[in-house]
Image (tube, rainbow, N blue to C red):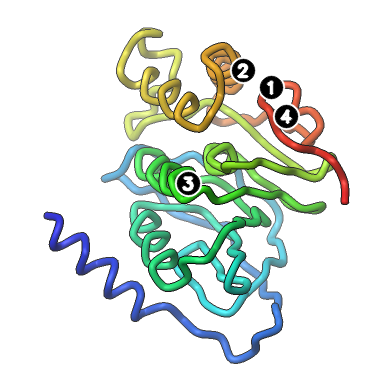
């Protein structure tokens, strides 16, 4: 299995789409997506179509902006961990992930894997003014070795749901399904108290709804830098 995974990473590295211009261009990305019945359940919030950076190379939902910066511009899915690994193999100097248009994920289980990769690589996460990070995308923002967001940046949180439609509250508080998220938050640098409070807050909102927060409001729940400039 390890050799197969390595082959996938290599093939994705060769398949990265170079873009003609070195200056950052902008393209329109649709947020329509489909349900992945083989994964860990979808978790994303649709919003209006947004303009996102095209960058100099594309790896799934990730765009390389330059040698030191990448951006997340779409939903993640089961292929995103391999796409992120391929990007880091080709651009190992990336130190900042800008989160521009992040609706969430089509595979909540796979979504935590690039989060752990971001943390292990010491990459910082940043949501600029006008940036929107929603649903499963918030897990990836929390992965940043240093987390920064414009005070007016947009975030949306809600409960996860598995492929059978069951939410966090449908499982025992000590179940593996809930424990894995608390463990993830602690691995991302949250204290046990922060992890439990944040997780309870997100799961107080039904999966088919969303609670909208500014960067300043999110900072009431987790430690992030909301300084401007």
Alpha-carbon span between mark 2 and mark 4? 11 Å
- Determine the CA span between mark 2 and mark 3: 19 Å
Residue under label 2: 201
Of the pair 48 and 127, the residue shown nearer to us: 127
Residue at 51% over, 53% down = 75
Mark 2 crowdedness (10 Å alpha carbons): few <14, some 14-19, many ≥20: some
Element assignment for label 1: loop
The image quadrant that residue 81 belongs to is: bottom left
Tell me the CA gap for discs 3 and 1: 22 Å
Q: Which mark is residue 130?
A: none
In the image, which disc is placed on residue 218?
Answer: 4
Tell me the residue at 39%/13% (across/down). Answer: 170
| Label 1: how many Cα within 10 Å (few below 14, some 14–19, many 20+) | some
Q: Residues within 10 Å of mark 4 (few under 14, many from 20)?
A: many
Q: Which mark is residue 105?
A: 3
Q: Residue at x 37, y 18 (%)?
A: 179
What is the quadrant of residue 5 in the picture? Answer: bottom left
Foreground label between 2 and 1:
1
Mark 2 → mark 1, Cα distance in angstroms: 9 Å
Count the labels in the image. Answer: 4
Query: Marks 2 and 4: which is nearer the front?
Result: 4
Disc ID at residue 221: 1
State yes or no: discs 2 and 1 in contact (Cβ < 8 Å): yes
Q: Position of residue 93 (x, y in %)?
A: 52, 66
SS at mark 3 in the image: strand
How far is the residue under mark 4 from the one under mark 3? 20 Å
Q: Is residue 153 left or right of residue 56?
A: right
> In the image, is residue 77 above or below residue 167?
below
């Amino acid at each position: 299995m390890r050799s197969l995974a390595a082959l996938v990473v290599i093939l994705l590295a060769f398949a990265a789409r170079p873009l003609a211009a070195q200056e950052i261009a902008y393209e329109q990305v649709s947020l329509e997506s489909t349900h992945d019945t083989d994964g860990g359940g979808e978790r994303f919030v649709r919003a209006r179509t947004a303009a996102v950076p095209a960058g100099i190379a594309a790896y799934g939902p990730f765009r390389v902006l330059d040698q030191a910066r990448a951006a997340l511009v779409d939903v993640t899915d089961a292929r995103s961990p391999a796409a992120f690994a391929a990007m880091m193999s080709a651009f190992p100097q990336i130190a900042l992930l800008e989160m521009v248009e992040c609706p969430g994920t089509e595979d909540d289980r796979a979504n935590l894997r690039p989060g752990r990769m971001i943390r292990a690589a010491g990459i910082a996460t940043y949501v600029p003014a006008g940036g929107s990070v929603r649903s499963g995308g918030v897990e990836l923002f929390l992965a940043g070795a240093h987390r920064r967001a414009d005070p007016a940046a947009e975030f949306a949180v809600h409960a996860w749901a598995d492929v059978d439609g069951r939410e966090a509250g449908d499982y025992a508080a000590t179940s593996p399904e809930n424990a894995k998220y608390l463990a993830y938050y602690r691995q991302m640098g949250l204290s046990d108290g922060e992890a439990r409070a944040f997780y309870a807050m997100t799961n107080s909102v039904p999966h088919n709804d969303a609670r909208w927060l500014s960067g300043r409001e999110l900072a009431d729940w987790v430690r992030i830098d909301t300084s401007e400039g």
